[in-house]
Amino acid sequence: MPAPGIAGRGALTVALSFYTVYAVGPMIWLAMMSLRTTQEINLDHYGLPQVLHWWKFQAAWVNSNYGTYFWNSVWVVVASVTAVTLIGAMAAYCLARYRFPGNRAVLLAIFSSIILPPQITIISLFQVMVEYRLFNTLTGLILVYIGTQLPLTVYLLESFFSRIPQDLFDAAKIDGCSDLEMFRRIGVPIGAPAIVTTVILNFILLWNEFLYAVVLITDDGNRTLPLGIQKFIGDQFSDIGMVATGAMISIVPVILLYFVFSERIIQGMTAGAIK
């Protein structure tokens, strides 16, 4: 493929520059607002902070109960993503590598559940949670998150595992590997980029999840971060500076996750393209 000329590189640079400003600009603005008071923001919405009010983070963490909301989100999301990854990877591996009666029907049923909007199941889900005394508990919310994210994880990983050459598994079987060892020694290492991609995707989706949490959680001690921000906006809407501080606290873990696993994300996104 010929290398792009000077005009092509210039157009690409301009396009990437615009996209970078579009993607990063709102986060920089939010970071600046989180360090300014509401009075300073009202005087100049887009001004730079003259004094860095770091005390706002401590005030939001302690006085607004953000510490409890944060650790509730950490516990719910980490437990859900761990379970979804383990169960989803093993289920996807079985559907991709083994042929049994109903194999395609199971995969079609999983795919069908992805396209249904969550509003369809919310009422029946609420009744089930109440009946089994899981309503208003973090355990119930974790089970709901596992059930909602498992189909998408299985669907994504199944398409990746199905592309692994069968010769690798045949050679491992000749060497005496059991089915579980083939999954652990071949499926997991080769599928690591795709698995990490689903981990990050599920983490971001569940970290920002609001619909199920607002319906199934009413106790203030069990609220997650999105509910905490919503409550803060409802009670003190005029204090936009503290709302920005709370939003900044909520996005820090996602940014750190991107920095740590950015290389894995690129590998997972390009794995199918370079095959």
Image (tube, rainbow, N blue to C red):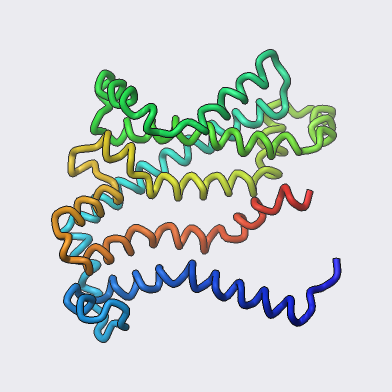
**Image check: 55 left or right of 22?**
left
Residue at the spot 24% in from the left edge and 55% down from the top edge = 67
| Residue that lies at the very extreme toward the bottom in this rendered image | 50
Where in the figure is residue 94, as x and y percent of width and height? Answer: 66, 26
**Image check: 249 left or right of 20?**
left
Q: Nearer the viewer, residue 2 or 268?
A: 2
Q: Quadrant of residue 242?
A: bottom left
Q: Quadrant of residue 252?
A: bottom left
**Image check: 91 left or right of 130?**
right
Where in the figure is residue 181, as x and y percent of width and height? Answer: 69, 31
112 vs 259: above or below: above
Where in the figure is residue 209, as x and y percent of width and height? Answer: 37, 45
Location of the N terminus (image quadrant)? bottom right
Q: Nearer the viewer, residue 111 or 204?
A: 111
Residue at the spot 23% in from the left edge and 33% down from the top edge = 136
How many marks do you count on the picture?
0
191 vs 108: above or below: below
Where in the figure is residue 78, as x and y percent of width and height? Answer: 42, 44
Q: Nearer the viewer, residue 76 or 2?
A: 2
Q: Nearer the viewer, residue 114 or 246?
A: 114
221 vs 236: above or below: above
| Residue that lies at the very extreme toward the top in this rendered image | 101
Residue at the spot 60% in from the left edge and 28% down from the top edge = 91
